[in-house]
Amino acid sequence: MEDLSNSGTASPSPSTFSLSASGSLEAISTPDTQRSLLFDDDVAEDPLDITGGNSRFIMVVGGLGYIGSHTVLELLKENYNVLVIDDLSNSYESVLHRIKALATEHFAAQDRPMPALHFRQLDYRSPCMRSILASYSSYSIGRKASTPITEITRAVPSGFPFSALQRTDSGIDMETDDAQETILRRESRISGVIHFAAYKSVEESIRMPLKYYSNNVCGLVDFLSLLEEFGIKNFVFSSSATVYGEGANCGVPLREELCVHHPETFYDDAGLERQVLPGVLGLTSPYGRSKFMCESILADIARSDPSWSITALRYFNPVGCHESGILGEDPRQKPSNLIPVITTVLTGTKPVLEIFGTDWSTPDGTAVRDFIHVVDLARGHIAALAASAARKIKTPFRAYNLGTGRGHTVREVLQSLEETSRRRIPVKEVGRRAGDVGFCVAEVRRAESELDWRAEKSLADCSVDVWNFTKGRCEPQISDEMIC
Ligand SMILES: NC(=O)c1ccc[n+]([C@@H]2O[C@H](COP(=O)([O-])OP(=O)(O)OC[C@H]3O[C@@H](n4cnc5c(N)ncnc54)[C@H](O)[C@@H]3O)[C@@H](O)[C@H]2O)c1
């Protein structure tokens, strides 16, 4: 295997894993996988192997993080082969084993073989990404008038065995006159990319903006160039409701047209035609700006080359975890989202939950958010891939809100978790934070109609699953007065 050395982060040294449900070749046969891909080396060692559409992969970048890990599991359950890239800067290798365990259990219960799950521990900005993409390419020999040999050699990865090319069954000899017409076609086995890798702390982004722009924005630009080079143009991007900036303060569910990157015309709820200009006001952090910039870059690329299919999924407030309690939100960084903070209070790591702002004009004064179960969110990515494959997405770049369309106050979330855990969660009311908004809920009709996706799980489901994930960690430390 190639030396997959890391670059740019202080993450642990890289490693390579390849997991599959069974050692039997026959067992690894799914609608998407006719040929076994038990080991990564199968792919890397055979650059002339042409398996066409039968061993395609979805590449999930940042696939061991909170949302990525749940998405990888759902992809496997839907029979996609998955290649995960993650540098573990905010996740742990154990997450890979948890995904594998849950997927194995799922396929065993159905007596079906599991698709391939490959993992490379790597910063997605590393030059090694080129070798990885080369190893997931298939090569075929075709003919084209007056193709210079230099073009053919440029198309092959470094270390490509030219002697093997000269010995092909077609009898093509690169030294003959015929070689002027011979071309090596490269086709990627990666049929789509879901890009989760980014730093996500608003507070840290204000302190360390360059770290955020480097990973979230510059990393994306170089990555897109590389994907283009390999002809991989099906791309799903993790965006956020934060791109609405101060528009999120409008007090009604947010439509995608409130943030566009090129002029658009749409019909409002009264049926009137409206024109909307690009740009957004009131982005308050480098993190938020990085998401807006990434969307703009993606929209520009899609406009310049409509053969791209790019979906930007604007997440509202992802919460919950897999119902098994095995997979959940387990970051290396100090959490700042509501539910992980509540769980640190439940586990006793933090003494009290701070509620920021109790004077919003909402039913109980606390802020309203659209909390979406992470498994629903994960399935939204699969819906986006499916809609793109079925050519149902109208434009080369399209943004979708992924939310429930329903708001809950912070106190309602708290109450739900207290009821589920049967524990009291101590709170301290503090003032509003700069940049916060009182009401942020998604308008979800676009995702429903174009992606055929809607959130199904409730806030109560989220609480049950979060408690399942948390209780094992906190019971020994909980004092009796916490129990309701
Ligand atoms: N969780 C939320 O509330 C939320 C809301 C809106 C948008 N998002 C976006 O969704 C995406 C995923 O969020 P999450 O909550 O799962 O975050 P996360 O931190 O749990 O997951 C991100 C993963 O990417 C990896 N990563 C980061 N930089 C990398 C790099 N350069 N190379 C390789 N791997 C790298 C991390 O190790 C981590 O496993 C992010 O882009 C985030 O901005 C998250």
Image: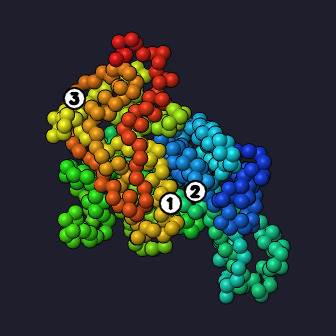
Residue labelled with disc 1 = 385
> Residue 97 vs residue 241: left or right?
right
The residue mark sitting in front, 2 or 3, is 2
**Residue 240 image point, x, y percent:** 36, 51
Circle 2: residue type: Ile
Q: Is residue 13 above or below residue 27?
A: above
Residue labelled with disc 3 = 430
How many neighbours does mark 1 have within 10 angstroms: few (below 14), some (14-19), or many (20 or more)? many
Find the distance from the CA under tag 1 to the CA under tag 2.
Answer: 9 Å
Helix, strand or loop under label 2: strand
Residue drawn where x is 83% and y is 75% of the image: 169
Helix, strand or loop under label 3: strand
Relative depth, front residue between 72 and 184: 72
Q: Is residue 342 above or below residue 306?
A: above
Looking at the rendering, the quadrant in which ligand 1 lies is top left
Relative depth, front residue between 160 and 138: 138
**Residue 446 image point, x, y percent:** 35, 61
> Residue 113 vs residue 167: left or right?
left
Q: Is residue 347 visible?
A: yes
Circle 1: residue type: Leu
User: If the image is split into quadrants, where does the C terminus sit?
Assistant: top left
